[in-house]
Image (spheres, grey):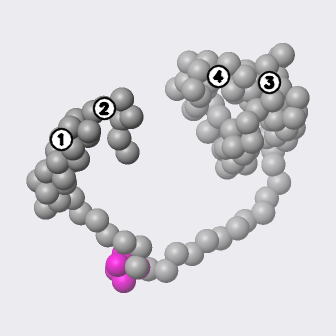
Amino acid sequence: MHDRLATEEQQLIGKERSAQLTRISAPFVLRRSADINAKYLPAKEQFVVFCRLTRAQERVYKEVGRAALYGLGGSPPLKPFTAIHLLRQLCNSIKLLRLAAKGDEGGAGGSNELGELRVCALAAH
């Protein structure tokens, strides 16, 4: 990637410096591909365990669903990956939303709607 505003000379200098940095740092960077790691690690096992949500989780789950479709408090609908992330946290443990609410100021990425959802999660439990 190069800067379109840079002159050809500046771009050439940038490429040379990039190559120099790669040569200097290469001995210190350990890169292993998945097939190399597979030789040393046990096979990955996944277990899917189905269990009922608590009442508090159900309430917040429905609220996240509504927020994903219609928004929350006049804000636009949640982005799909944001909603999926919240639902995954919620299904694992409502405490994850609590921890995020305590750690975030106004929600992830400064989004007030997430902060409101997390407050909703705190109130539901």
Residue neighbourhood size for the residue with mark 4, other residues' Cα within 10 Å, grouped as few (<14), some (14–19), many (≥20)? some
State the residue in front, 50 or 43.
43
| SS type, badge 4 | loop
| SS type, badge 1 | helix
State the residue in front, 49 or 68.
68
Q: Left of 3 or right of it: where is 18?
A: left
Q: x and y percent of residue 81 in the render?
A: 69, 43
Q: Which residue is the extreme one toward the front? A: 8
Question: Which marked residue is nearer to the observer: mark 1 or mark 4?
Answer: 1
Q: Is residue 70 above or below residue 53?
A: above
Residue neighbourhood size for the residue with mark 3, other residues' Cα within 10 Å, grouped as few (<14), some (14–19), many (≥20)? few
Q: Left of 102 or right of it: where is 123?
A: right
- Residue designated by label 2: 6
The numbered disc on residue 13 is 1
Question: Which marked residue is nearer to the observer: mark 1 or mark 3?
Answer: 1
Question: Residue 102 sits in which quadrant?
Answer: top right
Amino acid type for the residue under numbered disc 4: Ser
| SS type, badge 3 | loop
Q: x and y percent of residue 66 in the render?
A: 88, 33
Give the mark nearer the N terminus: 2 vs 4.
Answer: 2
Question: Label 1 to label 3, Cα distance in Å?
Answer: 46 Å
Give the mark nearer the N terminus: 1 vs 4.
Answer: 1
Q: Which residues are magenta?
A: 36-40
Question: Label 1 to label 4, Cα distance in Å?
Answer: 41 Å
Amino acid type for the residue under numbered disc 1: Ile
Q: Residue at x 79, y 19 (%)?
A: 75
Q: Decide: marks 3, 4 in contact (CB < 8 A)?
A: no
Question: Which marked residue is nearer to the observer: mark 3 or mark 4?
Answer: 3
Question: Residue 33 sits in which quadrant?
Answer: bottom left
The numbered disc on residue 76 is 3
- Residue designated by label 4: 111
State the residue in front, 56 or 88.
88
